[in-house]
Amino acid sequence: MTPQRSAVSLMAKAAQAVASARVLLETNDADGAANRAYYAMFDAAQAALLRSGVPAAYALGKTHRGVINVFSAYLVKEGPVSKELGRQLKRAEEVRLVADYNGETVTLADAAELVNQAELFVKAMQAL
């Protein structure tokens, strides 16, 4: 699969994850909504990296933190993505870790904010 085709596939996954996050939020599943919102942002970030010409090995990375660091280095510090969007991606990862691993529950308000941010993030990455 070419990097461009991978980017299209990842962006489609991101859009689907946002839609899933909305559905989960409507059923009061804050943890599930936070998870899907994060993955929407993560997939959109990877797609943006691939489209920007970052080598696939770096764009797709071995770890989530690695991808987020490459995104920050290539698209936030040196590129067209705002620092605010970069911070939102990092914050989304933090919230997802709470939802999935820390044994705590994300509040509905935090999940709703994250889903809204994910929608804006995905749209911004599509516009690049």
Image: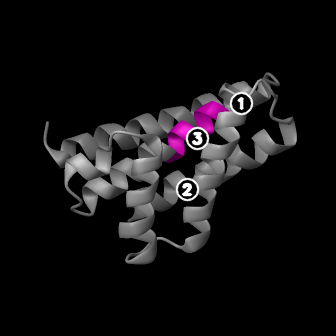
* Badge 2 or badge 3: first in the primary sequence: 3
Q: Name the amino acid type tagged 2.
A: Phe
Q: Is residue 73 magenta?
A: no
For the residues carrying marks 2 and 3, which lies nearer the camera in this image? 3
Q: How has the structure been colored for display?
A: one colour
Q: Which residue is mark 1?
A: 99
* Badge 2 or badge 1: first in the primary sequence: 1
For the residues carrying marks 3 and 1, which lies nearer the camera in this image? 1
**Residue closest to the eye, 67 or 47:** 67
Q: Main secondary structure of the magenta part?
A: helix
Q: Name the amino acid type tagged 1.
A: Ala
From the viewer's perspective, is 120 left or right of 22?
left
Q: From the image, which quarter does the C terminus lie in?
A: bottom left
* Residue shown at the point (53%, 73%) measured from the top left: 82
Disc 3 crowd, CA 10 A, few/some/many (<14, 14-19, 20+): many
For the residues carrying marks 2 and 1, which lies nearer the camera in this image? 1
From the viewer's perspective, is 10 left or right of 102?
left
The percent coordinates of residue 102 (x first, y second) are 73, 29
* Residue shown at the point (65%, 35%) measured from the top left: 97
Q: Is residue 38 magenta?
A: yes
Residue 121, which numbered label? Answer: 2
Residue 38, which numbered label? Answer: 3
**Start and end of the magenta stretch?**
34-41
* Residue shown at the point (37%, 59%) measured from the top left: 70
What secondary structure is marked by label 1? helix
Q: Look at the picture and state if 116 lies above or below 63.
A: below
Q: Name the amino acid type tagged 3.
A: Tyr
